[in-house]
Image (tube, rainbow, N blue to C red):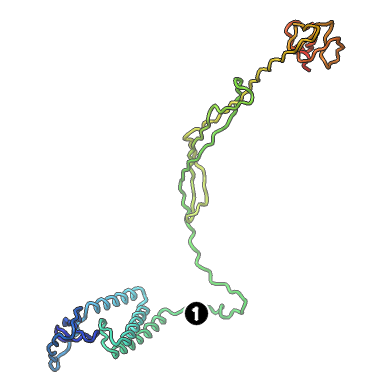
C-alpha cells in the first residue's frame, strides 16, 4: 500500500479503521464512523512505485544472510539454503491458508503460492547440491559380498594416543594407636584393677608419591613419615597383695581338762601325747587342725616347722 498517512479500512478487522503511517499499519483502531480518508492520488503515468522495507524485513533478511554466510564458511551452504527454503515453504503455506501474511509482504494467496513454488525449487536445488558435495561413502565390497553368517573384519580404528602419567605428592594424617600395658601393684589387693594412666593416641603425617593416568591412580609410594604427636600408653595396675587370713575361731576347752598354752587356734589337750586328728598318730589325745604354735611344740605337731600344725 503506497497511500499517504491517514485512516483506512482495517484489512484484519472489518468495521474498524486503522491508521496507515505511509509505510506500515499502526496499532491505533477506531470505529468505521470516522470520515473516510481523502482519495488516493493515482501515480502519474510512467512513475515507478517505491516499496519500502520495514524493520521486520530488514531483521529477517539480515538473519538469513548471516546464516548463509556462516554455513558457507563451514562448508554447509547448500544444506542451510535448503533449510531456509523449507522455512519459506511453511510460511507460504500459512499465508495460503490465511490469505495473507502482511508482516512478511505476502498480501494474497497468489503471492503465497509463488513463495511456496520458489521455496520448493530451492529445497530441491540445495538438497541435490549438498548430496553432490558430501556423498555417502559406499559400503566396502567385502561387506556386500560376504555370505550370510560370515563375519568380516571392520577396518581398524586409529589408535588413541597413550595418556601421560602425572606424578604428585599427597600427605595424609593418620592416628597412631596407644599401647596398653599392665603392672603389678603390691599395695592393692588381689583382684583390684585400676587404670592409673589413660591412653592418648598420637598423630603421624605420611607423604606419598602418587602416579595417575587419565585421572586414575595407578601407583602410590610412601616417601616420608613424620610423627607429630607421640602416643601415650595406657597403664593398668593389677593388685597382688594377699589378704590377711581370718583369725581362727575359738575352740571350747574339752570338759574335764585344760588346753596346752603353747598352741592356739584349736584346743590341744594336756596329755601324755597328742596327735593330729585323722592322722597316723596313736594318741591317746587328738586335736583338729589347724593349730598355731605360739610356744614350744611339745607334742611335735608342726613337722614342717612353718608354725602351723595339723594343716595337712
Considering depth in this image, is 15 or 167 the residue closer to the camera?
15
Considering depth in this image, is 250 or 185 the residue closer to the camera?
250
Tally of marks: 1
Q: Is residue 254 above or below residue 228?
A: above
Residue extending farthest to the bottom is: 45
Q: Quadrant of residue 48?
A: bottom left
Q: Inspect this view and state whether residue 174 appears.
A: yes
Considering depth in this image, is 250 or 188 the residue closer to the camera?
250
**Element marked by disc 1:** loop
Q: Give the quarter of the figure containing the N terminus.
A: bottom left
Q: Is residue 302 above or below residue 130?
A: above
Considering depth in this image, is 148 or 123 the residue closer to the camera?
123
Give how far across and how far down residue 306 sits, in percent: 74, 12
Left or right: residue 177 compared with residue 251: left
Give how far across and how far down residue 37 sits, in percent: 14, 87
Q: Quadrant of residue 47?
A: bottom left
Left or right: residue 267 compared with residue 67: right
Packing grade of label 1 (10 A; few <14, some 14-19, many >=20) is: few
Rendered residue at 48%/57% (across/down): 163
Give how far across and how far down residue 156 sits, in percent: 53, 69
Q: Is residue 264 above or below residue 16?
A: above
Q: Quadrant of residue 274?
A: top right
Reading the image, the residue beneath label 1 is 138
Left or right: residue 144 compared with residue 81: right
Amino acid at each position: 500500500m503506497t497511500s499517504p498517512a491517514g485512516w483506512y479500512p482495517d484489512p484484519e478487522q472489518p468495521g474498524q479503521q486503522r491508521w496507515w503511517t505511509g509505510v506500515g499499519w499502526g496499532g491505533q483502531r477506531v470505529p468505521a464512523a470516522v470520515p473516510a480518508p481523502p482519495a488516493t492520488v493515482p501515480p502519474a503515468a510512467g512513475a515507478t512505485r517505491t516499496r519500502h522495507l520495514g524493520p521486520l524485513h530488514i531483521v529477517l533478511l539480515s538473519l538469513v544472510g548471516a546464516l548463509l554466510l556462516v554455513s558457507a564458511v563451514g562448508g554447509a551452504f547448500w544444506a542451510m539454503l535448503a533449510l531456509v527454503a523449507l522455512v519459506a515453504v511453511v510460511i507460504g503455506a500459512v499465508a495460503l491458508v490465511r490469505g495473507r501474511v502482511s508482516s512478511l509482504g505476502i498480501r494474497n494467496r497468489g503471492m503465497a503460492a509463488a513463495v511456496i513454488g520458489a521455496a520448493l525449487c530451492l529445497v530441491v536445488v540445495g538438497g541435490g547440491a549438498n548430496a553432490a558435495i558430501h556423498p555417502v561413502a559406499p559400503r566396502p565390497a567385502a561387506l556386500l559380498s560376504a555370505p550370510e553368517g560370515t563375519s568380516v573384519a571392520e577396518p581398524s580404528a586409529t589408535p588413541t594416543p597413550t595418556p601421560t602419567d602425572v606424578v604428585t605428592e599427597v600427605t595424609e594424617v593418620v592416628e597412631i594407636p596407644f599401647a596398653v600395658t599392665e603392672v603389678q601393684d603390691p599395695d592393692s589387693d588381689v583382684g583390684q584393677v585400676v587404670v592409673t594412666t589413660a591412653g592418648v593416641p598420637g598423630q603421624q603425617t605420611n607423604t606419598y608419591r602418587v602416579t595417575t593416568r587419565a585421572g586414575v591412580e595407578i601407583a602410590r609410594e610412601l616417601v616420608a613419615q613424620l610423627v607429630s604427636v607421640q602416643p601415650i600408653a595406657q597403664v593398668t595396675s593389677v593388685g597382688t597383695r594377699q589378704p590377711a587370713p581370718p583369725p581362727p575361731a575359738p575352740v571350747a576347752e574339752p570338759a574335764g581338762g585344760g588346753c596346752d598354752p603353747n598352741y592356739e587356734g584349736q584346743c590341744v589337750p594336756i596329755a601324755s601325747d597328742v596327735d593330729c586328728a585323722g592322722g597316723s598318730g596313736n594318741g591317746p589325745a587328738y586335736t583338729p587342725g589347724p593349730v598355731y604354735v605360739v610356744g614350744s611344740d611339745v607334742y611335735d605337731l608342726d613337722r614342717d616347722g612353718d608354725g602351723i600344725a595339723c594343716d595337712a
